[in-house]
Image: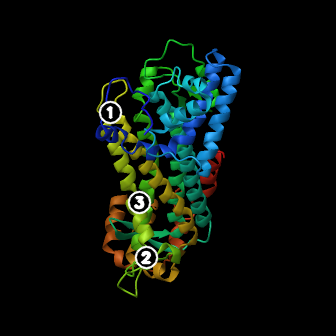
Amino acid sequence: MTQPLWQKSGIQIDPRIMRFLAGDDVILDREFFLHDITASKAHVEGLQHIGLVSVDEAAALKRELDALAEDFRSGAFVLDERFEDCHSAIEARLTERLGDAGRRVHTGRSRNDQILVATRLWLKDKLAELEAHCRAVAEVCLERAAQPALPMPGYTHLQRAVVSSTAMWFAGFAEGFIDNALRARQTHTLIDANPLGTAAGYGVNLPLDRAHTTQALGFARMQVSPIYAQLSRGKYEMAVLEAIGAAMLDVRRLAWDLSLFTTAEFGFVQLPAQYTTGSSIMPNKRNPDVVELLRASYASVAAARTEIEQLLSLPSGYQRDLQFSKGSIFHGVRHGLMALELVPDLLAQMAWNEATMRASIEPAMYATDVAIEQAAAGVPFRDAYRAAAETAASAGEGRTPEGSLAARTSPGAGDQLKLDELRARLAALGQ
């Protein structure tokens, strides 16, 4: 390993302690490495603005940072156990190539604000991915909701309740994922604050050009207080995981529906072949493993959020405990986005079994229609309810699922799906 940035003369480093301190940082930092380089370039420009590096030195530093980024992308440079973390790797490379100019690059900066800004840039990218995935799910749902509606049972308490339709089912998840996309956008707004220049949490005795780095890195605002920059670490990561978790809650319920609907007992849905797997022992089986793992995926996101929450039992200021949040962030965000990416294609290709769904609609499922019609005619609803309950077995006489859906004129129900309104909400998010 290269000499730690914090190494003092006369102190012997115990390799066991060093391994514990470094942990998985050098591996996890590969995810944030390019963002760290981007932030380093902005920091160099800021140092140039206040005269701490010359114009030529700044040009050389940025050139070497670009070269390091390219070497990392191509595999010519590997972030490995030679380095304590990505920050030390960048500084070591610049010092090796540029000598004193490389040694100046950390002026006015701490690894605390360095990892904060790299992580913040990474989180912004991931929220953009989250919004895109949620929009894609919503778009597929809206497309399929606009297709001819197929009658199906609507369930409460997992018991057949009233007539519903495939269009209503898709419209429900469409609206849910429009909200999820909006939440991703709102969370992006929340965390879009530049912590670079707050150093170790108390600022430095230099007139750092924080306005420039804020603009150069594409942040909407500066995170003003150095103390709050540290307080926000973990808080903002939890907010991102909560936004992903909100989407994954809807994925979990959607996957639960499909898990039930694909059973022989329901027989409502046929999954695309590529979303199923075979049994290792039973030749006759095709299992909905992808759907089941989609259903389970919320747990990974929730666990990541919980781990960070438990780490945040801390006083103000930087504490090393927060190093352990990197793994939680990476694994929770990565797993949630990987799961969401599969959902649009699954929903686009799944097939409904119309005959089975229609056959599952029982006469008693029209009893609510009967009670409401009587109430609309002037019968007190509770009297109409009791009368409909007594004759529920014959409630379907002369009725069809299509007629039930057409008569349901409350906004959003039956044939009144208001898909145009949902499309307008989605469009209002912009691109």
Residue at mark 2 to residue at mark 3: CA–CA distance: 15 Å
Quarter of the image with the N terminus is: top left
Quadrant in the rendering for residue 50? top right
Which of the pair 113/399 is nearer the observer?
113
- Asked if one can make out residue 142 in the rendered structure from this viewpoint, the answer is yes
Q: Is residue 383 left or right of residue 402?
A: left
Give the image location of residue 208, x and y in percent.
Answer: 57, 17
Q: Earlier in the sequence, mark 1 or mark 3?
A: 1
Secondary structure found at label 1: loop
What residue is pinned by disc 3? 252
What residue is pinned by disc 1? 13
Which of the pair 54/190 is nearer the observer?
54
Give the image location of residue 98, x and y in percent.
Answer: 62, 29
User: CB atoms at circles 1 and 3 under 8 Å apart?
Assistant: no
Residue at mark 1 to residue at mark 3: CA–CA distance: 48 Å
Give the image location of residue 12, x and y in percent.
Answer: 31, 30
What residue is pinned by disc 2? 262
Q: Earlier in the sequence, mark 2 or mark 3?
A: 3
Q: Is residue 120 left or right of residue 70?
A: left
Residue type indicated by callout 1: Ile
User: CB atoms at circles 2 and 3 under 8 Å apart?
Assistant: no
Give the image location of residue 43, x and y in percent.
Answer: 59, 26
- Asked if one can make out residue 366 in the rendered structure from this viewpoint, the answer is no
